[in-house]
Image (cartoon, rainbow, N blue to C red):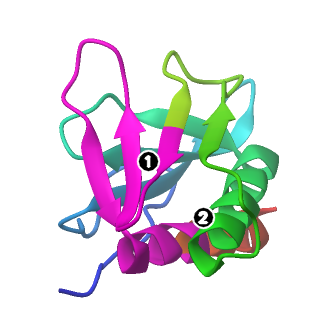
Amino acid sequence: MENQVKYAESTGSEKAVSESFSLVVDRHVAFGALATVRIAAQPARRFTLQEAAIVARALTAVASGASKERQIYMSPIASDCDFDARAGEDGLVIMREGFEDAQLDWPATRSLAAHLAQAARANS
């Protein structure tokens, strides 16, 4: 099933949710625009727009096979939750201690990357 992600305005309310992930861009008093990603039942990750662009490039490189990296890790400045993903044969496994691992297949990984990149460009 195709991921559907739409962006929220400054209210922070989600207009649509994907089966794999949701992405909302809203404003923070100190950090400005933040991209908030929710994957499965794990805690939200809040990325600055620059961080969102970096994670998008890393996800794209791993998903397309341009990078042989097996781990993508970031500790976003505006988030209480790090982003720790391991590449497998069928996609990414996103981990968070105390929570069930979340799986994103390669199409969902590419979709998340594209939406993070779009959010970073559109809101910068």
Image quadrant where one finds the C terminus? bottom right
Res. 104 visible in picture: yes
Please name the residue shown 78% across and 53% down the image: 54
Q: Which residue is identified by label 2?
A: 116
**For the residues bearing labels 1 and 2, Cβ distance under 8 angstroms:** yes
The mark found on residue 124 in the picture is none
Which picture quadrant has residue 38? top left
Task: Please provide percent x and percent y for residue 120.
Answer: 72, 63
Q: Is residue 87 magenta?
A: yes
Furthest residue in direction bottom, as rendered = 2
Q: Is residue 66 above or below residue 88?
A: below
Q: CA distance from mark 1 to mark 2?
A: 9 Å
In what element is the residue under mark 2? helix
Residue at 67 percent across and 28 percent down: it is 76
Residue found at x 60% / y 64%:
116
Give residue 80's position: percent from left, percent from top: 51, 15
